[in-house]
Amino acid sequence: MTPTHAQLQWVLNHISEMLSCPQDGTRLRYGDVECPHCGADIADVLEAWAARLLEGLPGDPKDQ
């Protein structure tokens, strides 16, 4: 399946979303698996971000 322009735009816009540590508010960077400041586990933050990405991803026009 070749991604549509809308799907590509959604992903590109979504990856620029700023995430922060729920414990101390430190901005997270790409590749962080824990807060670089306090060491808190950020798996829940990353899973919520991934869920928003997938839930909002425009569908394939052939499926509609």
Image (cartoon, rainbow, N blue to C red):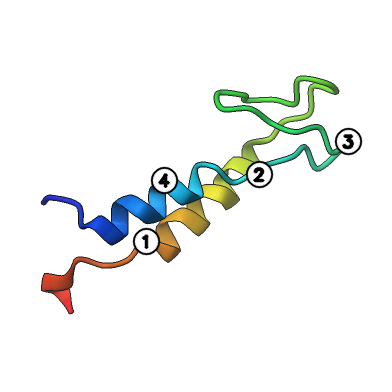
What is the spatial separation of the Cα atoms under label 4 and label 1, in whole angstroms? Answer: 11 Å
Give the residue pinned by disc 3.
24
> Residue at (49%, 42%) from the top-left corner?
15
Tell me the amino acid under the disc marked 2. Answer: Val
Left or right of 64 in this view: 35: right
Residues marked 4 and 2 touching at CB (< 8 Å): no
Mark 2: which secondary structure?
Answer: helix
Number of marks: 4
> Residue at (55%, 23%) from the top-left corner?
31
Q: Which badge, 3 or 4, comes first in the chain's sequence? A: 4
Give the residue pinned by disc 4.
12
Camera-nearest residue between 41 and 7:
7
Tell me the amino acid under the disc marked 3. Answer: Asp
Left or right of 14 in this view: 64: left
Label 3 CA crowd tier, 10 Å (few <14, some 14–19, many 20+): few
Give the residue pinned by disc 2.
45
Q: Which badge, 4 or 1, comes first in the chain's sequence? A: 4
Label 2 CA crowd tier, 10 Å (few <14, some 14–19, many 20+): some
Label 1 CA crowd tier, 10 Å (few <14, some 14–19, many 20+): some
What is the spatial separation of the Cα atoms under label 4 and label 2, in whole angstroms? Answer: 19 Å
Residues marked 4 and 1 touching at CB (< 8 Å): no
**Mark number, residue 57:** 1
- The mark closer to the camera, 1 or 2, is 1
Tell me the amino acid under the disc marked 1. Answer: Leu
